[in-house]
Amino acid sequence: MKISGATFAGSSTRVSQKPKRRLPEFAFIGRSNVGKSSLINSLCGNQKLAMTSATPGKTKLVNHFLINDKWYLVDLPGYGYARLDRKGREELAAVIRDYITRSEEMVMLFVLIDSRHDIGRIDLDFLAELGELGIPFALILTKCDKQGPNVLAAQLERDREILLQQWEELPPVFCTSARTHAGKEEILDYIENILNTL
């Protein structure tokens, strides 16, 4: 799939506020500084589409982007922000949960994980919650260009072993780099294949 058009379609904190036009939604979520906005900009070929920042927690709303006038790419707030107070974390968690449990148009949730570190307890708890809720998801490993191929391969195997302690089978996994655009075509082709089945 080639993205020829990507436009901001609106922000919301509740599903009732999202764009009125109903189209398939592919949502992206991850912990702070995982590289979510950079990946979204890479996928869409627009470095200014999603706001990037070195400060964790900049995305506090559910942001919809209309892609090729056919589907929405949805940029979700991140989970597990240590710098927010308890009330702030609870409010963000409520925004996330409202969207992932109530948006009937969401067909896939992409969960971003930093490839340089072992999958953390916060990530595993979030994935477990998705499993309990029956929400379809795929994993995107970010920043795969930041280490050599042997170190990366070893890290991917460690992550696989960690996940298999909790899951009988693994979801689709994509290894990406916003800088080199590695994984971009694979993710877009995966989305296109899903769209073709709807």
Image (cartoon, rainbow, N blue to C red):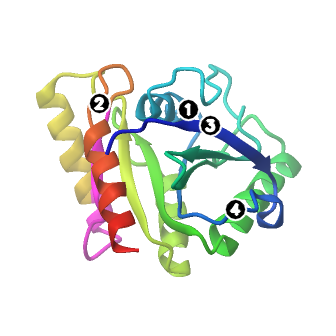
Identify residue for label 2.
144
- Is residue 163 magenta-colored? yes
- The quarter of the picture where residue 148 lies is top left
Q: Residue at x 26, y 77 (%)?
A: 168
CA neighbours of label 1 inside 10 A, class few (<14), some (14 to 19), many (20+)? many
Which secondary structure lies at badge 3? strand
Identify residue for label 1.
37
Q: Which mark is residue 7?
A: 3
Q: Which residues are magenta?
A: 162-176
| Amino acid type at mark 4 | Arg
Q: Seen in the image, is 41 located left or right of residue 168?
A: right
| Amino acid type at mark 3 | Thr
Count up the numbered dots. Answer: 4
Q: Of callouts 2 and 4, which one flags the residue occurring earlier in the amino acid sequence?
A: 4
Q: Are marks 1 and 2 in contact (CB under 8 Å)?
A: no
Q: Residue at x 34, y 39 (%)?
A: 2
Q: Quadrant of the N terminus?
A: top left
Which secondary structure lies at badge 1? helix
Identify residue for label 4.
21
Vertical order, 16 against 39 (above or below): below
Q: Is residue 198 visible in this depiction of the protein?
A: yes
